[in-house]
Image: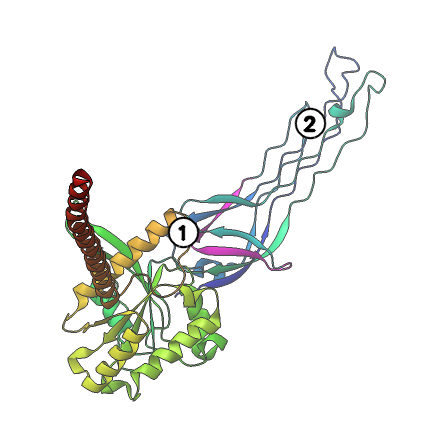
Amino acid sequence: MFVDEAKIRIASGAGGNGCMAFRREKFVPRGGPSGGDGGRGGDVIMEASERHNTLVHFRFNPEYKAQRGRHGEGSNRTGAEGHDIVLKVPVGTIVYNEDTGELVHDFSQPNEIIVIARGGRGGRGNARFATATHQAPRECEAGKPGEELHLRLELKLLADVGLVGYPNAGKSTLIARISAARPKIADYPFTTLQPNLGVVALGEEPDVKSFVVADIPGLIEGASEGAGLGTQFLKHVERTRCLVHLVDVSDASGRPDPVKDFEVIDSELENFGAGLEEKPMIVAASKIDAANPEKLAALQRYVKRKGLEIYPISAVTGQGIKELEWAMERYVEEVRRRTAAGETVVGPRLFATTAEVDGNSKSKQGRIKMAAKKAAKKATKKVAKKAVKKPAKKAAKKTAKKK
């Protein structure tokens, strides 16, 4: 069961009470105060674990309480401290305070550890209150109570590439083809009801390149407003580095216009917010083994006008899959490089298209040719001027000599 939201109640342990006692031993008259301090209560700790990928263990056990500290005892014995409890959460979990709505912590890295609720301090025993003028104190402190919080946990998957598109566009088949993930695949809408992660490895040792792909359940019109559980699915692509938009170009979808399908999903990404419309995007025309040529041509024209890269693929036959894998790897590496350099990645276009590159190179070559022509003209004019000036100078010298 994939659970990506949970509400829990946590409470740290209360501190133990201080003890009021006096030393009573044979041959030790008036031994004085000997009450020990109470022990500290246990903390509630959260740790990001790569072994967990869902919040299901919080769904059926929503309350967690750390052990309280033991009370102080006579003979200046301090009470034992309460045991801490450690709650394991998947990487990508965001913790909110349910009462105030504030963000407590975002577990974006593995093995992150934070103390969510600190245990109460133990009370002081009467031995702590003894002074030169107050040698038999009869006061002691009670332990401090622990913290109690109501938390809301929200899991957002961490992946490099997110697969988006209409239901039955071929997302699950694609991730099963390129990784070891085995999602449910069937010929009816909303077969995938939970996101699936798969690791894609390219190349050979020792130069293997890998990235994580997330198969997001199908989106429909109105998904940004909750239609078809859209808001629950869209949040899982918030942290991806780039998107692969699968568009069905076969007649099996029952939708006549693939361009309209692209525009609907694109508008839902934009309406949802969270910067999804600014993520780099690759378009994959899926099911080309049964493609309608007119649909494929219309989609290719539209996508090229937008300046995006499009890859016709068939996850069943494997056609175009390798090209798409290397394109995804290229996009992921480029986003990683720009992020490491502190640059912001804005807009679905990450690279210039081939036509633009060719056009730029041609225009550059044209500029070089024009500059060469201008330089040649200048050189020709200089030579011509020199050729005219030399005979004129010689004639003027001869005339001067005769005079």
Q: Is residue 180 visible?
A: no
Q: Is residue 107 above or below residue 127?
A: below
Q: Nearer the viewer, residue 90 or 59?
A: 90
The residue sitting at the right extreme is 133
Quadrant containing the N terminus in the rendered view: bottom left
The main secondary structure of the magenta stretch is strand
- Give residue 97's position: percent from left, percent from top: 59, 56
- Give residue 306's position: percent from left, percent from top: 33, 73
Q: Is residue 342 visible?
A: yes
Residue 231 drawn in magenta? no
Q: Residues within 10 Å of mark 2 (few under 14, many from 20)?
A: many
Q: Is residue 71 above or below residue 297?
A: above
Check disc 2 and give the amino acid type: Gly
Q: Is residue 121 above or below residue 166?
A: above
Magenta-tinted stretch: 83-100
Reading the image, the residue beneath label 1 is: 343
The residue sitting at the top extreme is 27
* Residue at mark 2 to residue at mark 1: CA–CA distance: 58 Å
In terms of secondary structure, where does tag 1 sit? loop
Q: Is residue 381 left or right of residue 347?
A: left
Check disc 1 and give the amino acid type: Glu
Reading the image, the residue beneath label 2 is: 36
